[in-house]
Amino acid sequence: MTEHTILAETTEVTSNFIRQKIDADTAAHKYQRDGLPSVITRFPPEPNGYLHIGHAKSICLNFGVAQSYGGRCHLRFDDTNPEKESVEYVNSIKDTLKWLGFDWVDAAGEEHLYYASDYFEQLYDFAEKIIEAGYAYIDSQDADTIRAQRGQLHEAGQNSPYRNRPVAESLDIFRRMKAGEFKEGEHVLRAKIDMASSFIAMRDPVIYRIRHVHHHRTGDAWCIYPMYDFTHCISDALEKITHSLCTLEFENNRPLYNWVLARLVEVGALTQPLPEQTEFARLNLTYAITSKRKLLQLVEERQVDGWDDPRMMTLVGVRRRGFTPESIRLFCERIGVSKADSWIDMSVLEQAVRDDLDEKAPRAVAVLKPLKLIIDNFPEGHAEPCKAPVHPHHPDMGERHFKLTKELWIEQDDFMAEPVKGFFRLFVGNKVRLRYGFVIECTGFDVDDQGNVIAVHANYFADSKSGTEGSNNYKVKGNIHWLSDASASPAEIRVYDRLFTDPHPDAGGKDFMQALNPDSKHVSQGYVENSIADAAPETHFQFERHGYFVTDRLDSKTGALVFNRIVGLKDTWKK
Ligand code: ATP
Ligand code: MG
């Protein structure tokens, strides 16, 4: 893989090599079949974990291509490994796909939800057919021996002593395997191709094995299960898929994909035109992990709070973090589709959500780490009405109203007892503007027994209110936000950051657990302005000066608000 990282906001929905192939196939009328669209794609997850950001690329590509050619895209669960699969994963994958804005129900209202396990009967029949035609045999050696005989990249494999087993004998054993007469590993069914092929996948691959395990859909009906390479191409053909898009690691399996389908045409089980596999580069995102197995390890070792931890690059995680479906689709559009593996920088994903939310998220004030401000010369009991637009570019979204009082909450970080060079906000003797309110001058502060600052004192200038003429007489460098008790609701604020500090946490077999960011989650008790006190779960805001936030979809309730930070206003990771 190239070490080159893509930072730029590159491609739009422009052409790519996949669209070019589809255009060529359409021009040649390759998939003209009665009553069927000329483009049928599929997204084929294995229900052995939660989808991650990498899957979003495949989903957007498969569903996107189908949509733009007036075709359809199937959701197919590739559920042939019963030990690792479950209904929990199936349901989550369906939810996530819908959340992203895609649907397996086509324009005509027809459902296209499939399971490879629905084809077990047909797959079995097809396997018998190719045994009968002499294209597959039962091998009775153990897995280690078979593996050892497979050879190396530049060294041919060895034929199995069972390779020339009579067809009738293979057929008989295969039927008895199905009937449950044997233990796991006693026999396997292998395709008879070429033990000297330059493609290791073509060296008599195993296509069926014995597994005495319960399947989440077929129960105990089967004790033999087909392998991926046999199942996938046949499932594609049975569903009349035209373009089977998959990631580059399957490139070496393409000859096998074509071999299986061609043999089935030969024996009269399938007809032309056949689906064709085209590979594209998988998404690798910096500062993230996109492997279900490693994500599972983070969950099991409790490095995160579950699959939907807002720091996880699972799609349930990014959703909970506050990324919108539009932002994920925008991200996938921007990264485009290519034939060469590369890294996409996390900032591209973060920028996509800023670009999506900037125009639509209502603005609000939130004080994340409150510190008391006392305006000593402010009239006791007075509440000065202040206002701000809900969105600076969209007056139609309305106004927010809040009251300025003698005591306010400001951000701890906006005050320094001993200001460092370049600090323009509150310190004794300095003036700042309280956004939408008055200019104040800091006069002192109170500390507790331990020396912690517990309150800041200031005086205000009554003729300095924002929006009045007098305000122009005051030139200040700092402009800070605030809330008064009269206009604020308490809220829990969860500030998240990237889960890893290393841009390539698992590259080259590195231990990604060593690269965990110890500062990826900060929880504080703060305040938000009252205008958003009724915010429903999963509502997005821009908190002024802080960034984009969302009400947590599970934990936030009226009266007990919880916000997650999605991203800051600017990229702070840039070097
Ligand atoms: P993992 O390696 O995380 O287990 P997988 O490839 O085994 O992922 P599947 O459920 O088999 O996961 O994947 C479903 C589809 O999503 C496949 O077509 C696969 O090629 C595609 N896909 C998986 N990961 C990525 C990725 N990082 N980028 C693009 N497509 C991906
Ligand atoms: Mg897979």
Image (cartoon, rainbow, N blue to C red):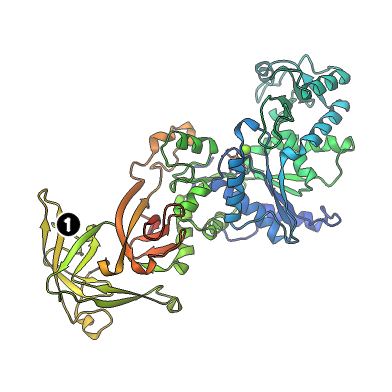
Name the residue nearer the viewer: 445 or 358.
445
337 sits left or right of 220 in the view = left
- The answer to whether residue 338 is seen in the rendering is no
Residue nearest the viewer, comparing 320 with 510: 320
Q: Quadrant of residue 430?
A: bottom left
Decide: is 95 above or below 207.
below
Callout 1: CB less than 8 Å from ligand 1: no
Q: Which residue is mark 1?
A: 420
Residue found farthest to the front: 559
In front of the other: 269 or 48? 48
Q: Find residue 352 and report its horizontal and vertical position in percent.
A: 49, 59
Q: Nearer the viewer, residue 169 or 218?
A: 218
Which residue is at a point 22% across and 66% down the rendered structure image? Answer: 408
User: Tag 1: residue type?
Assistant: Val
Give how far across and how far down residue 299 sits, in percent.
46, 37
Horizontal side of 177 relative to 65 (left or right) equals: right
> Does residue 41 appear in this view?
yes
**Residue drawn at x 26%, y 79% as measured from the top left:** 466
Residue lying at the far top of the rendered structure:
161
232 above or below 12? above
Which image quarter has ligand 1?
top right
Secondary structure under tag 1 reads loop
**Crowd rating for badge 1 (residues with CA inside 10 Å; few <14, some 14–19, many 20+):** few
- Residue 23: x and y, percent? 74, 57
Is the N terminus in the top left, top right, bottom left or bottom right quadrant?
A: top right
Location of residue 330 by image quarter: bottom right
